[in-house]
Image (cartoon, rainbow, N blue to C red):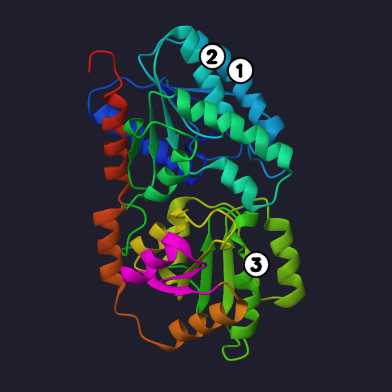
Amino acid sequence: MVATRLYPPEVGAAAFRLEALVSGLREAGASVRVLTTQPPKETPGTARRPDVSRWPVLRDAGGNVRGYVQYMSFDVPLFFRLLLSRADVVVSEPPPTTGVMVALSSVLRRRPYVYYAADVWTDALVAIQAPRWVIGCMRFLEGHALRKASTVIAISDGVADQIAAFEVDPQRLTVVNNGVDTTVFTRDGDSAPVEYPYFVYTGTMSEWQGAGIFIEAIALVAKEFPAVQLHFFGQGSAETELRQLADDVAPGRVTFGGVVQPAEAARWIRGATAAVVSIVPDQGYDFAKPTKIYAAAACGTPVIFAGGGDCASMVADNGLGLASDFSAEAVAEKMIRVLRQSDDGRAVRSAWVEDNASLRLTGQRAAAVVLRQLPDQ
């Protein structure tokens, strides 16, 4: 059984990652049921499925299950849904509040659970300078969910290192790489029907990602390339601030397209001069590897990464694009460089993702870890 607040047809890296896990489990012959949320009414492709149990939840103004009240509207009913459900093992996706509900119900039902950690929420709160009491509460909840799990799956070595700080037994921690659907994010296919050069940002817009650096940079790039544009697709807690920044420093040059289906995102990525990705450095989140890097590279599009840590070396060392210091001037210099030069690395990038970050392989690896927790294994 899989417990998650986000599952397709809703769009998001967590949703696709868990769908790949479920596919991997079914390929191995397991019977799987998903306990998740009722998506917004306008979400396409929400057909009723007997293996997916959905529950109505509170959502924020953007239609997201984001915020503590929204989380609890899912987590509290989830606790009772789990108590009334039969399963040999349960997989929990963050947030840690969900992990705690899975942990408590698992104790009462005397069954193991797996915590699938895509990131460390406590570190994200530190990165955005949340109040100390909020960080302390989250650290307690996250530590409990991690330590009580029969095993923890981390999506990268960096995430695993952060999890180890919660005193999780290393023998119960397994790393599987993050990935993207390489049947959707591929070099083959249509590109967005525009004639001007543009850069694209896809996915979550959070404070710790600092995507405003690209808005400041595009204003500098426009001095040499007047037709250049910057397109954002996705949503997040920093979106309002980013929109205001765009109006202030780059009016008419930045477009926010909202959440789009993966195939549409791939069209815009294919046609972009480069995809832009950022993590604010030295705020405790340098270990993260955003999925948007893999999505861009799978389409053959170069990545401009602003920040440090693992992502900078991954992008630079594998021919995925250019790593930049976290300043508007440095980012603008990299943008101008890719605008000026020809690109002959699309096939190399796409092949690297297929070999190292395919979501299908990630799902199979994660499924193998989960299946090892079954009582007869």
Disc 3 vs disc 2: Cβ atoms closer than 8 Å? no
Residue picked out by circle 2: 81
Residue picked out by circle 3: 212
Residue 38 visible in image: no
Q: Secondary structure at mark 1?
A: helix
Instruction: Tell me where residue 137 sits by quadrant.
Output: top right
Whether 298 is drawn above or below 26: the answer is below
Residue 252 picture location, percent across and down = 69, 75
Crowding around mark 3 (Cα neighbors within 10 Å: few <14, some 14 to 19, many 20+) is many
User: Which residue is rendered at x = 37% and y = 64% of the image?
Assistant: 314
Whether 75 is drawn above or below 164: the answer is above
Q: Amino acid at mark 3?
A: Gly
Which range of residues does the magenta coloring cover? 301-325
Residue picked out by circle 1: 77
Q: CA distance from mark 3 to mark 2?
A: 41 Å
Residue 362 picture location, percent across and down = 31, 43
Whether 315 is drawn above or below 258: the answer is below
Left or right of residue 338, residue 253 in this image? right
